[in-house]
Image: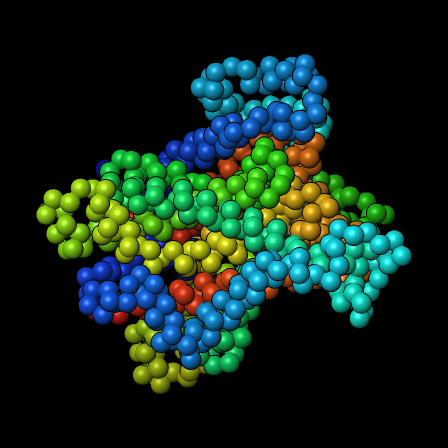
Amino acid sequence: MARASPLLLYVITRALLAVPMLVILLTAVFVILRLIPGDPIQALFGGRGNPSVVAAARAQLGLDRPLIVQYFDYLGRVFTGNFGQSLTLYPGQSVMHWILLVFPATLELALYSMIVAAVVGILTGVVAGRYRGTPVDVTLRMYGIVIWVIPIFWLALMLQLTFAIGLRWLPPNGRLSPLTPVPTPRTGLYTIDSLLMGRYDIFIDAVRHLILPSLTLGLVLSGFFTRIVRVNMMQTLQSDFVEAARARGIRERSVIYRHAFKNALIPVVTVIGLQFAALLGGAILTETTFSLNGVGQLLVRAIIAGDYTMVQGIIVFYAILVIFVSLAVDIANAFIDPRIKY
Amino acid sequence: MAGKPIPSDVAIGPGPAIGAAILPPAMRRGILGRVFWPLIEERRTLTGIMTFVGLGFLVAFVVIALTAPLISPYDPLAINSSELLSAPSGSHLMGTDHLGRDVLSRVFWGARTSLLIMAIGVLVALVVGVPIGLTSGYLGGLVDRVLVLVMDSIYSFPGLLLAMALAAILGRGVVNIGIAITVIYVPLYFRVVRNHVVAVKQELFVEAARALGARPGSVIVRYITFNVISSIPVIFSISAADAILTAAGLSFIGLGIDPPIPDWGADLATAQQWLPNDIWWTSFFPGFMILLLTVGLSMLGEGINDIVNPLLRRTKA
């Protein structure tokens, strides 16, 4: 038999490794939700719950059983895709159904934010690395620092204030204008569904609603790209092959944009992976500020409504997402960068 | 805010070996000297300027927080129905909110809330994460591998989300929120300290101490801890900036500090509903304060990182 390619072996090992990672993350979620001093049910009822109601909720959720039984029951449910039923927010309805219903809004925001972050971050990073040590570099480096620690909800409010309330160029919040019909759901992403329907008016409306949220989240995340691309650009410009290109008399412009640029982009996939957790966290705040009905907002509403199963379901959903993306990024990296050894 | 400190800054992965050649000049300066001397040397470079500006910001906010009762022109809780939502003016430099409370005074008192939560969050993370990191790195083996796996999975998770879950269970209030955000930073302190220990414990002087019969406890405390301490200031400033953003985020979505208490995040959440009426001052100033403080902290971290890392490289050579 021919030897399996090391790349394939790596992909398989990495995929198998995702399972224990998921179990560990799920265990961490369980530990945090159950073993922390304080009673989740009592806390979620705001301490005002009628004792018999609280006891009933506890029994219904199986929280009166030994912890170890609860733990395996929970793992078993998660792996069979059963997230239970909502308690208070949408009583009796499937948690999974609600998560999947609102997920496209989060996905759409995440997608366009990542595009903004990558484009802005790569441009600023390459320019800063190219003009290393000059005032341009210092300015862009400061941009990278400041934008990364800007409170996302504050940036959101300031953009709303300027472009929606002051200049009235863009709608302040929501996914569509009140009178715009919701496109027939195929992907759930309004920008794609509207195009599939051929309704350009809906498409334009959806895009107008997406500009401010994506800009908010994207700009904040771009700070990270700026820094990584800048450092990488500086290193690439010092490497032997760039030196060789210069020695052959290739114009500086072309050395930078043809030779160095491509190599400086290699870490971008890794950065997208590293940024994913930040993206999800930032999306929660962005959704809240722009009233986008996504998973983040569902979580906030579930916490405030004291919907224990919904909260747990959403956190588990995020855990699966995080593991899946880190797996995808590692595999993508293995294909992109031939220097990685397995 | 983006939920996570920037890992590239913390030199995750076995850092450069230190300790071997550091002894003669550095030891004479002591622990504090080792941290502060390079600062003085670098004071004219961009790195030095950033460090000092950042330090200045932090000190300024600490002073504001400590002296809030003295420097606030008004009582931050005093409701004044004759001056609702008045724009910034001579008597109210940052205007008043929808209850006629002075925004400037609330911003000053808000510094207290923010810094207190940050201090609790970061200190608990330090107290929990550092010893576990030291032990895990020193012992190695299965314990170490399991701990690394667990900490890494927690670290890979969106910090804000974990903090939200914890805050929901623990309840509101400064102490509870401080504890809720700790969970994000324990893995960070653990990881950095552990990796540093793994690098340091290969050094000859540790080997020598062991050969002379030093017990594991004293090897960790005497020979390793002091060498690892230099990595703490960098993670401190990164985690502190992030802690402030996370705590403000929690308050903004209504899980942090209850309304009457002055808090930047909670005040922003209230201010949001007045934005459509062109009331910009109630949201601009609290958020701007968060930004100043976090920018200061990251410049400090950035500067210290630049200083500590070249120092490590120099001493290795």
Q: Quadrant of residue B306?
A: bottom left
Q: Nearer the viewer, residue A70 or A263?
A: A70
| Left or right of B312 on screen, residue B3 | right
Up-down: is B295 above or below A41?
A: below
Up-down: is A114 above or below A260?
A: above
Q: How many numbered circles does the render carry?
A: 0
| Left or right of A78 on screen, residue A113 | right
Instruction: Give the residue furthest to the front.
Output: B70
* The C terminus of chain B, quarter of image: bottom left
Q: Residue A264 at x, y = what percent?
A: 42, 66
Q: Residue A112 at x, y = what percent?
A: 62, 55
Q: Residue B302 at x, y = what percent?
A: 45, 65
**Is residue A103 something one can see in this rendering?**
no
Q: Nearer the viewer, residue B121 or A95?
A: B121
| Left or right of B206 on screen, residue B111 | right
Up-down: is B289 above or below A186?
A: below
Up-down: is B151 above or below A157?
A: above
